[in-house]
Amino acid sequence: MLDFIVQGFVSALVPENLLVMFIGLLVGIVGGMLPGITTVTAVALFVPFTFSMSPEMALIALGGVFCGAMYGGANAAILINTPGTPGSIATSLDGYPLTKQGRAEEACYVALLASTLGGIFGVVALMLFFEPLSKVALSFGSEAFFWMGLFGLSTLAAMFPGHIAKGLLGGAMGLALGTVGLDPVMGMPRFTFDVFSLVQGLDMVALMIGLFSVSQMFVMLESNETYIVSMARQAHALKRALIAVLRHLRLLGVASAIGTFIGALPGAGGSVAALVSYNEAKRWDKNPDRYGQGAIEGILVPESANNASVGGSLVPLLSLGIPGSAAAAVLAGGLMAQGLTPGPQLMEKNPDIAYAFIVSMILANIGMLFIGYLLVRICTRILDVPKLLIIPAVISISFLGAYALRNSMFDVMLMIVSGAIAYVLLKAHIMPAAIALGLVLGRIIEENLIVTCYRAQAKDSLADLLVFSPMAAVFMAACVLAVIIPLWLTHRKERAAGIVRRPRLSAACLGRYDFWVVLLITLGGIFFFNQSRELTGVSSYFPQAVYASIIGLGVFIMGMQAFQSAPKGRALPSCGALGNIGIYLGIMVMAYLLIEPLGFYTALFSGTGAMTAYGVFGLTKRKCDWRGFAFVLGYTLLLTIVEYGCFRLLMGVQTPTGFLL
Amino acid sequence: MLHSILRLVCALLLASLPLSASAADYPDKPVQMVVPFNPGGGSDLVIRLIEKEFAREFGQPLTFVYKPGASGAVGITELKSTKPDGYTLASQSYPHIIIQEISGSGNFAVDDFDYIGMFATDDIFFAVRKKSRFHTLEEFIAAAREKPNTLSVATTDTMGCSHMAALKYKSLGIPVNLITYTGGAKAIAALLGGQVDALMIVKSVAVPALSKLNLLAVCNTARDALLSDVPTFAEKGYDIVQFNGRLILAPKGLPADVKKRLTDGLVAVYSDPDVAARAKNSGYDIKIADGDAVKKMFDDFRDEAGKLVKLAQSLK
């Protein structure tokens, strides 16, 4: 094996192979940064270019795209709280608070170093342990997946200290959003209300762009500050990042191991790896409350886990011929078109190619260090740009990102609507991250619940499989503990502080904003619960359970509030700020309506221009002279051209044309 | 800098002007191919394989638009409302498209489209794991009859070709328990992990995992060229014929000469030996049928498909 590894290094270091690796990395990183371009899309878009390459070269290039795309989402998540890929949701939880504290550069470097080390860990694990790893992965049946999904959700209880029930409510809403569309058993429409656009379901990526990016831009509009953070540039950021990573090497190893293992499970990829490892790191930390407030570990852990999952997802591909993730499946397709069969045969018949590929992924991770370093230097400059110029840019990229994934105008509308709703919920302490967690895990939970039910038909009873099988019992115990421990901790803290609750019913809750939001959600839950009673069979279990828990949690939260005397909710933003948010939202809707008559980029240009002009002339009171106009026009034009270059020319996204482009 | 920006803007404006199309010089602009699935799947790959050859044959490139959702039903429904000028085509599979008409998950009927033809097929195999206690189809069926509904058969796509094949299997009175997985990878993993006993799977997904699988039968009238030691269901006395056919279609009302140009050109492209070799590597067989033959396939299958969909609904 050793000689194959050495040989792999030699062939991966051939200049042409290094060149295509760097091109692949660049495409991957840019794709990962752009919302709407996921790892799968980035790899798939690169496959046709590899048809004319030698098999070795093709694999090296695709490996570069795969690694780069997994890392690419981190910077946007840290700097402006907008995760570019589902894999970097967890990164934003601590990344953005760090930016707020003026530690943006350090955070970005930690993400880069952790991604590189995690990526290398995953590939080395792939090289050394792919046989045993694949065996363990295979023993993971549908009941284990089901409980793993619930276990992931259970950490919602600890995610938002002080708002445990609201965290769970947000998660349940995320689960509910995932049930719209075709049911996974029969492929029949449910919750679509005869609207055909709903048959395709609510897309996770479009929803997430709305939940995170758009709502975050609204939050930014609330304050009068000029910049996202007003801080001097941090000195020695790279050195601090290095020290932070070195100090947490053990944690990094554990997170990478979790990431590699989850990557090796067919059907769970980088996003699940990042979320689960983040939650585990938090659970086992001595002081879990630091997480979410800007803990450096909160970046280190998910970023190393999601890049480690790349190596992991190749484990079943190389040992069994089963792709461990959608991106690995695309990679397998590219391999097959080359006349190579991925799977155990590849290791036996073409070990030279297989090892050149594996070794090249290690090199790709090292190469990522250089490209990533330059990228961090450039990206952190965004903090020197006035906030009111960033907002139009992020919103217009959100339009493209929402459209790009499925080429669907419905998704653009979904993005706008979910952004507005997410803002309303955010003000009631129901956080986008909770909803996103429900979205990511919902499909895994429901699919595996259904499969387990069907499998149980061949066995004696459902309970034997779902509750009493060993894997299920372990996970179930973990779930129960995960919910009870944070509750108990809160209780103990309150007792230690001498707080004695004397519940008394009062009408003060009626004056609370979040009371009314929760009431609306509960009413919505009742409506949909009624709808879900029309469903029959296995496909009705999950939606009914989800809507029942929304109703239950909603009633519980309102009940608690009814017994609290003084409202302690945060004050709402001023009327002026709300007005501004309304104007931006209005411009977004206008831009959406203009897409059909004018064409995508023209509508985007007008919308971006209107937002920039309103920001520059209306909010910062710049004088309306020709220089101001030239500035707005130039900035908008530049933005649109850059977007056209990235999405149309680089990623090949086709957009609708109207009267113009 | 300013000049180059201006030039770019002019070029963009020019490129967006509508061009008039006449059948004689079709195609005189790029042809848009709607792939109603995520990039990288089978429907994508079958077209991507001929990307270069298409441009050589027609003198215009293909541009790809991905409109995934509902097993292709979303993209195909949108195709219905595009102009039938030959500049918008789509790829979709048989039998998915006719099942979507019957089950109502697509907002269309198969007659809403003109079919350029079927160009590739993907065989479906009935497989068990290598270490399974069953070595032949007869052994499996005997065990299934002995203890009804205790053996599980996994399928890889809800209301798709492997699901149909498994439903046919069940409708022949073989008492097995059907489990639909969402994707070939998950189903193979479940088979190898021992969570299910057998699997209906398309060839292109099964090929990489062949060394771990034991193929008991193929759902076709003739044996597969590549895997010729696997018997057909017909040889064993069971009438189960099902395959995945890759279709290329256009909205209804395509001018006859454009349709002919497309059919002739695509037949030539798919007959190219390079293309055939690449397709074979990927687990597909080039098998060409023209639009009328495709329509006949639909008509022959329609009644049976209706019964199978009813059977599936009764199982849930």
Image (cartoon, rainbow, N blue to C red):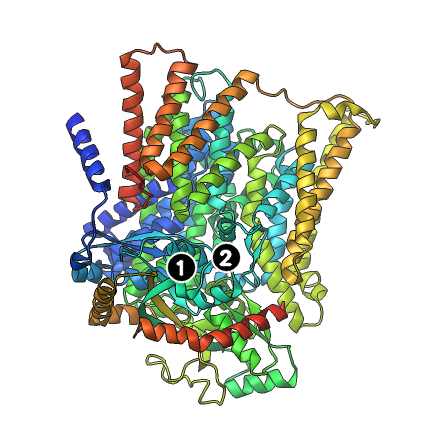
Subunit under mark 1: A
Q: Nearer the viewer, residue B113 or A625?
A: B113
Regarding residue A289, the answer to whether it shows in the image is: yes
Tell me which residue sits at (42%, 73%) in the image: B298
State the image coordinates of residue B257 (x, y, percent, origin top left).
21, 64
Three-letter code for the amino acid on which mark 2 is drawn: Gly
Residue A49 drawn above or below residue B229: above
Residue A653 drawn above or below residue A133: above
Say which residue label 1 marks: A329
Q: Nearer the viewer, residue A184 or A29?
A: A184
Q: Earlier in the sequence, mark 1 or mark 2?
A: 2
State the image coordinates of residue B101 (x, y, percent, origin top left).
48, 64
Subunit under mark 2: A
> Extreme top residue here?
A623
Give neighbour class at mark 2: few <14, some 14-19, many 20+ (Cα, 10 Å): many
Say which residue label 2 marks: A267
